[in-house]
Image: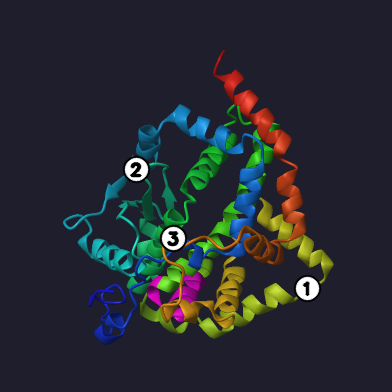
Amino acid sequence: MSDEGSGNGQESGGEEARAKRVLTEISSRSWEHPADRAALQALRKIPVFDDVLRSMFGFFGEKPIRLAFQANAVKVSETQFPHIYGLYQEVCKTLDPEREYDLFISQTPIVNAGAYGMDEPFIILNSGTIWLLNDEEISFILAHELGHIMSDHVLYRTMTVLLIQLATMGFPVVGLAARAVLVALLEWYRKSELSSDRAGLLTVQDPEVAMMAMLKMAGGIPNGGKWETEYSLDEFIVQAEEYRSGGDVADQVYKVLNLMATTHPFYVLRVSEIRDWIEGGDYDRIIRGEYARRGDPDPAIQEDLRAAAKAYAEGAKDMVDTVADAARRMGEAFRDGFKR
């Protein structure tokens, strides 16, 4: 990271910033969660699934979709939000993508960010996120979104958002078939967040920064001032572990139902996943420089499937499998709907 302040108006230690390892030519396989990879593989096995999504994307067009997402946003550059631009430059330096992607800031109090597009991916950072988080935590968010792009998530994420919007508007093409596909997309979408949390952690290279960002986003706590003494990361970690391991069968059912309509896993679960990954040793190995590089051969598919099977519940696989027919019907409905 740069020598700029780690908090909005606060100074950070330059020595710590300079100590970060640059992850030269790192492959996204290094951080991808097995559940993410398994869910995406399952989606891609559904007949005509990719064709339907690409047809829908093609109907709207790359440029109109970019404009729709960017219409109420400002492109970040050396002269436009230069401080955020500097943070983004350091994120790109550490995570080493093949190229730099456009970054925009959108004025909204909703604390969030997103990576969208297909041939020309881009990142949207909500202004509410900037007000809530300090510089290191913002860098974690930017790296998280960059991780989505490097993992080739953006087509599916863009179409998930569009389908949600069309469904909300009552668009006739988004009938029962499309809603079934949307349920499957949301199931994968949540898993993809776990992968990108790892990309964010690999970039800031400080687990407390990653988990503090999640604490603040879960609680909506302003950055700095009197609030700095009002929260405890240790207690939030305890809460995360209690949520994950506690409760009876009914509690587990309610957790699933709560997640069905969401795009993101609950922050307490994401904290637990990050801690599991660190404790498993993969994070430290990557920081030592032991990671897959772009262009390295992909692991044997059987090995990948074994890892996926361990991490991805059979029930989720079954749910994705049931939308195969729905995807077919969605494609037919989409084509027929625009012929009229």
Answer few, some or many: residues within 10 Å of disc 2's Cα (few below 14, many 20 plus, some between 14 and 19).
some
Residue drawn at (39%, 71%), measured in percent from left and top?
203
**Does the magenta run of residues contain 327?**
no
Q: Is residue 27 left or right of residue 256?
A: left
Three-letter residue code for mark 2: Gln
On screen, residue 169 above or below 116: above
Residue drawn at (48%, 80%), measured in percent from left and top?
285
Q: Quadrant of residue 265?
A: bottom right
Q: Which residues lie in the magenta part?
A: 203-216
Three-letter residue code for mark 1: Gly
Q: Nearer the viewer, residue 291 or 144?
A: 291
Q: Quadrant of residue 2?
A: bottom left
Q: Quadrant of residue 8?
A: bottom left
Instruction: Determine which residue is flagged by label 1.
Output: 247
Q: Nearer the viewer, residue 320 or 70?
A: 320
Instruction: Determine which residue is flagged by label 2.
Output: 70
Instruction: Tell me where residue 165 appears, x and y as whole percent.
Output: 53, 38
Of the numbered discs 3 and 1, the one sitting upstream in the chain is 3
Of the numbered discs 2 and 3, the one sitting upstream in the chain is 2
Q: Is residue 42 left or right of residue 25?
A: right
Instruction: Determine which residue is flagged by label 3.
Output: 147
Locate the N terminus by quadrant: bottom left
Residue drawn at (42%, 58%), measured in percent from left and top?
145
Q: Is residue 220 visible?
A: no
Three-letter residue code for mark 3: Gly
**Does the magenta run of residues contain 213?**
yes
